[in-house]
Image: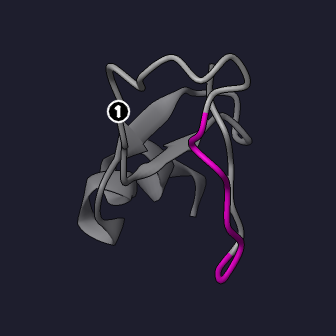
Amino acid sequence: MSVNLAKGQRISLSKSDASPLVRVRMGLGWQLAAIGEPASGETFQALLPAIDRHL
């Protein structure tokens, strides 16, 4: 399950049945498919090879 948050937005990590939270995974980065070619990365420089021929 993934959750997208805007800056300043919060989310509760408590479980409704009071069982302990075992695992949390956080990913920082981006994914792009707007130009028809999937790409992902963490920096603008990582994006350039995917969009260079479209500029």
Q: Which residue is mark 1?
A: 25
| Position of the C terminus by quadrant | bottom right
Decide if residue 25 is on the left or right side of residue 45: right
Check if residue 47 falls in the magenta segment: no
Please state which of residues 40 and 27 is positioned toward the viewer in this rendering: 27
The picture places residue 16, in percent across and down from the top left corner, at 73, 25
- The part of the image, by quadrant, that contains residue 21 is top left
- The part of the image, by quadrant, that contains residue 45 is bottom left
* Residues shaded magenta: 7-14
Decide if residue 3 is on the left or right side of residue 40: right
| Position of the N terminus by quadrant | top right
Q: Mark 1 Cα within 10 Å, few/some/many (few <14, many 20+)?
A: few
Q: Report the coloring of the rendering.
A: one colour
User: Where 14 sits versus 45, above or below?
Assistant: above
Decide if residue 34 is on the left or right side of residue 28: right
> Residue at the front extreme?
18
Amino acid type of disc 1?
A: Arg
Q: Residue at x 67, y 56 (%)?
A: 11
User: Where 39 sits versus 46, above or below?
Assistant: above
> Residue at the bottom extreme?
8
Q: Residue at x 59, y 42 (%)?
A: 32
Decide if residue 51 is on the left or right side of residue 11: left
Please state which of residues 3 and 37 is positioned toward the viewer in this rendering: 3
Check if residue 9 falls in the magenta segment: yes
Q: Residue at x 59, y 52 (%)?
A: 54
